[in-house]
Amino acid sequence: HNVAQASYSDRAKSAPHPLSAYLLRLMALKKSNLCLSADVSTTNQLLQLADAIGPSIVVLKTHYDLIANWDYNPTTGTGARLGRIARRHGFLIFEDRKFGDIGNTVQLQYTEGTAKIIDWSHITNVNMIPGKAAVDALAEAAVRWRERKRYEVKTDITVGTPRPESLDSDDESDTRTPMPEDHGLEAYKTAGVGRKASIVSITTVSQHFEPANSPRSYEDFGDEVMPGIEEAPTDRGLLILAQMSSKGNFMTKEYTQACVESAREHRDFVMGFISQETLNTAPDDQFISMTPGCQLPPESEDDDAEVQGDGKGQQYNTPGKLIGLMGSDIVIVGRGIIKAGDPVKEAERYRKRAWEAYEERIA
Ligand code: 5FU
C-alpha cells in the first residue's frame, strides 16, 4: 500500500493529527520506530529505564497500574518526572490503559482518579467493545484538556495572587490562582471540571518551580531538551485497539473494520491503532500502527528465526516481519529489551533491526 511505502518524514507533512506529525518527525530524526513497553514495578525503575533507553525510542508505553508507588502529583509525581525525561530525550508517553467502559466512565478515568492520565500521557488507547461512544467521550475530554492547557499558557498566572471575586469559592484559604474575570469562569466551564479541580491541576504554574526539598537526582531534569529535539505539541491522541497479539483473541475482521471506521470519524483525535499490521486501506488514511508482540531471536540466531511465545498467550513476531511485511509503523517491545542482560544495548539492536526493515520497505 502506498502509505506504507511513503517515508515517515513525508507522512509527517500531511498527517492530520499534530501529535502524529510530531511523532513521524521524531522517527525520522532519531531513526527509530521503536516503542519500549516499560513494564516495571516501581517509579525509580521506570524513570531509570526511560532515561537510559530514551535515546533509542520514540514512544514509551506504560501500564501505570503496574507501578506500586505511582505518585500523582502534577510537579513531583511519577508522570511529571517521566514527562521531563520524555521532553529531554524526545519521545512520547503512551499509557496502555485500554479504556473499556461507557463514555461517562472512561472520561472520568482519563481525566480524574488516581493517575489523571490525560495530564502526563500524550497517547492512550481504547478497547472498542463498549462501542463508539467511548471514543467520542475520550475525544471530548481531550478537546477540553487542550482548551484548558492553551488558556493556562496564554494567561500569566502568578502563584499567590488572590483569585478574583467572581470566582469566589467556599474555601477561603484557597488564594493560589488568579483567573481574569472575563476568561476565568468560562475557562472553568469549558474545562468541565470543578473550579478547585482546575486550580489544583494547573501544571504550567508548577513547571516554573520545584519545591526546595525536592530530591534532584539523575531523573529530575529541568526544562532542557536534547539538541535538535522540538517541543511536543499541546495535544492528546488516541490509539484504537483493533487487533491483539494474544493467542485466540476475539477480535474478528468485522471488529477491526469497525475500529477503522471509528478512527476515520475522529481524525483529529485518533492517531491510529494498536494492530498487527497497517490498517490504512482508503487513499486518505494516514493512521499510525503500533504493534506489540515483538521479539528478536537471540543474537546467535538468524534475525528472522521464529520466536516462541511467553507461555501465557503472548505471540511474538520479529521487527522484520512486522515492519517490513505487515506494514506496521512502530514495534512495541517489552521483555525482549527489559529482561536482556544489557537493556541499553538490546534496545539499540531492536532499533536498528526495525529501522532497517522500514528502510527496505520504502526503498
Ligand atoms: F494490545 C496489546 C496486545 O495486543 N499485546 C500486548 O502484548 C498490548 N500488549 C502489551 O504490550 C502488553 O500489555 C505488554 O505491556 C506489552 C508487551 O510486552 P512484551 O514483554 O513485549 O510481551
Image: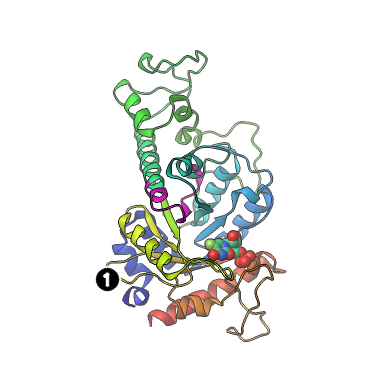
The image position of residue 317, as x and y in percent, is: 56, 76
Is residue 194 visible to us here?
Answer: yes
Question: Does 188 appear above or below 52?
Answer: above
Q: Residue at x 38, y 83 (%)?
A: 363
Q: Residue at x 36, y 73 (%)?
A: 7
Question: Does 316 appear above or below 123?
Answer: below
Q: Residue furthest right?
A: 341
Q: Residues within 10 Å of mark 1 (few under 14, many from 20)?
A: few
Q: Is residue 214 left or right of residue 14?
A: right
Q: At numbered mark 1, what does the secondary structure look like: helix, strand or loop?
A: loop
Q: Residue furthest bottom?
A: 302
Is residue 56 visible to us here?
Answer: no
> Which of the two residues, 136 or 298, is positioned nearer the viewer here?
136
The image position of residue 107, as x and y in percent, is: 45, 42
Ligand 1 visible in quadrant: bottom right
> Which of the two residues, 261 or 214, is positioned nearer the viewer here?
261
Magenta span includes 50: no
The image position of residue 150, as x and y in percent, is: 35, 38
For the magenta stretch, what is the residue range?
A: 119-136
**Residue under pointer 1:** 283
Q: Quadrant of residue 39?
A: bottom right
